[in-house]
Amino acid sequence: MIRRILLAVDDSAPAFAAADLAVELAGSLAARLRAIMVAEEGHEPARVLDAVAARARKAGVAAETGTVSDGLPPYEQTLAEAQRWGADVIVMGRSDQRRLGPAYVGSQTSRLLEFTETPVLVVPGPR
């Protein structure tokens, strides 16, 4: 049963599409939702996490948010947070880069998928 949904976001359109789906899942499953963003230079975690929390509130879903920053690559920080928090599923957006052939999965997502023991839902950006 899915009781804890960890949402990993950045400031991209696919991340906000993932946020919308995670909020919908949390609402329909009565699951807890935690949104995290890895602090990286040039990004504004508070702005992004506030926007995610506002989307959750609008849908009537309580969401906790947090910034993670321990110097590890983003995929490792996400995996560590999923394990620490006891996430049943990780939700994240797919890279919005395009190329010919199969859908592009960024290096951080690819590594996360390689090393996780937690199911991952990868969400494409809006069309």
Image (tube, rainbow, N blue to C red):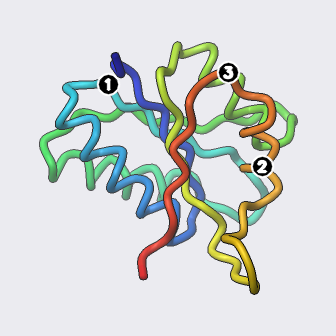
Which amino acid, mark 3?
Glu
For the residues labelled 1 and 3, the Cα–Cα distance comes to 19 Å
Image: 122 above or below 62? below
Instruction: Give the residue type at disc 1.
Output: Arg
Q: In this rendering, is residue 46 above or below 102?
A: above
Residue at image location 57% in from the left, 52% down from the top: 45
Task: Name the residue that disc number 2 marks.
Answer: 110
| Residue 2: % across, % down | 36, 22
Look at 69% across and 82% down and name the residue there.
98
Give me the C-alpha separation between circle 1 and circle 2.
25 Å
* Badge 2 density bin: few <14, some 14–19, many ≥20, Cα 10 Å: few
Residue denoted by label 3: 117
Tell me where residue 20 sits by quadrant.
bottom left
Looking at the rendered structure, the kind of residue marked 2 is Ser
Q: Is residue 65 left or right of residue 104?
A: left
For this view, does 9 lie left or right of residue 115? left
Instruction: Give x and y (percent) for residue 65.
Output: 44, 36
Residue 47 % position (x, y): 48, 59
Q: Secondary structure at mark 2?
A: helix
Quadrant position of the C terminus in the picture: bottom left
Q: Could you classify mark 1 by the number of other residues whose Cα lies within 10 Å: few (under 14), some (14-19), or many (20 or more)?
A: some
